[in-house]
Image (cartoon, rainbow, N blue to C red):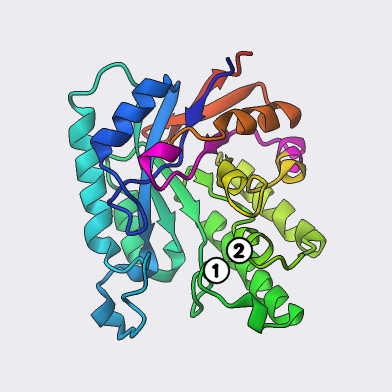
């Protein structure tokens, strides 16, 4: 059996997640994962409760308001559980979303000494909805590409900021644009900026993830796909994590083996986990 790690999972501390920290840890032990991280959401632009932003849509399922409360609570719960945990290589983590949209809060979370691992993610452009909520079928292609223009520009700025360990789901918008709506997108116009994103990460000693959530969704492919993982490797990238992006306990570890196969296909011989933000490498065993 190939070496399996899952470095991107959520519990009920994420507004769109289910399950407890304890349930997640039990599932990871049951699966015999070589490394496991809980990375509950901390969407920095939603630090406060909905009334602070005057948002009439705040009651929509999955909205991320109040991260200033639920993200620190997740870190506390993870840390406390780790103090009496045996038989599992567990990493205390967080998924830091849109850090530059509230950089003071982002740096406060990123400096928490209890954290081993930070995924930097970009779920929504400044002043726009999360890509999950956008009605793409009511837009023309030029409007969609304009969103992607800003998406990659803001992602590059986040990587330059650099207070993350890996970049999460590079091609996140395709989960919804192509997967849910069936609108085909050509990412070739973004090859240059994606190359710059990768070079920035490599220069800073940061990595990327293979996020296999797309395999269990309509999109049907990991985020990103093999071509981009190969590009990252060709540019000198060595730090690669794999994550299920599970939002319920049952999905922990799901399709991780497919991520390992992709890593091998891209030329990687090692997978990565983090202890206190220091990369540790595990040889892929077949």
Instruction: Please state the horizontal and vertical placement of residue 120, each as a whole percent of the image.
Output: 48, 52
Secondary structure type for disc 1: loop
At a point 45% along the width and 41% down the height, the residue shown is 8
Q: Give the secondary structure at mark 2.
A: helix
Residue shown at 76%/62% (left/top)? 190
Image spot of residue 86 (x, y percent): 25, 18
Q: Is residue 245 left or right of residue 70?
A: right
- Mark positioned earlier in the residue sequence (2 or 1): 1
Residues rendered magenta in the picture: 230-251
Residue in front for this viewpoint, 166 or 261: 261
Q: CA distance from mark 2 to mark 1?
A: 7 Å
Residues packed near mark 2 inside 10 Å, few (<14), some (14 to 19) or many (20 plus): many
Is-magenta flag for residue 245? yes
Residue contact at pointers 2 and 1, CB within 8 angstroms = yes
Q: Which residue is the site of mark 1?
A: 131
Report which quarter residue 227 is drawn in.
top right
Looking at the image, residue 57 lies above or below residue 179 = below
Q: What's the residue at 63%, 48% (across, down)?
A: 223
Q: Residue 150's spot in the image, x, y percent?
A: 63, 72
Q: In which quarter of the view is residue 20 placed?
A: top left
The label shown at residue 176 is: 2
């Amino acid at each position: 059996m190939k070496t399996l790690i899952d470095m991107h999972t959520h519990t009920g501390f994420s507004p769109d997640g289910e399950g407890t920290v304890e349930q997640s840890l039990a599932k990871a032990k049951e699966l015999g994962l070589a490394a496991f991280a809980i990375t509950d959401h901390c969407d920095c632009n939603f630090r406060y409760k909905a009334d602070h932003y005057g948002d009439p849509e705040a009651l929509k399922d999955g909205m991320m308001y109040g991260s200033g409360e639920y993200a620190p609570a997740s870190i506390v719960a993870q840390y406390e559980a780790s103090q009496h945990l045996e038989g599992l290589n567990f990493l205390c983590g967080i998924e830091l979303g849109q850090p530059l949209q509230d950089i003071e809060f982002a740096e406060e979370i990123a400096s928490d000494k209890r954290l081993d691992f930070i995924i930097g993610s970009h779920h929504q452009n400044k002043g726009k909805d999360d890509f999950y909520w956008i009605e793409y079928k009511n837009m023309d292609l030029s409007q969609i590409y304009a969103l992607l223009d800003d998406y990659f520009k803001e992602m590059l700025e986040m990587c330059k900021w650099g207070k993350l360990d890996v970049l999460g789901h590079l091609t996140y918008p395709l989960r919804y644009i192509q997967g849910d709506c069936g609108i085909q997108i050509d990412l070739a116009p973004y090859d240059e900026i994606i190359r710059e994103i990768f070079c920035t990460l490599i220069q800073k000693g940061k990595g990327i993830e293979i996020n296999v959530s797309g395999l269990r969704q309509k999109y049907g492919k990991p985020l990103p796909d093999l071509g981009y993982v190969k590009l990252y490797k060709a540019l000198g990238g060595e730090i690669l994590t794999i994550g299920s992006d599970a939002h319920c306990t049952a999905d922990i570890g799901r399709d991780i083996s497919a991520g390992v196969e992709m890593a091998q296909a891209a030329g990687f011989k090692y997978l990565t986990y983090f202890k206190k933000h220091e990369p540790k490498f595990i040889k892929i065993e077949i």
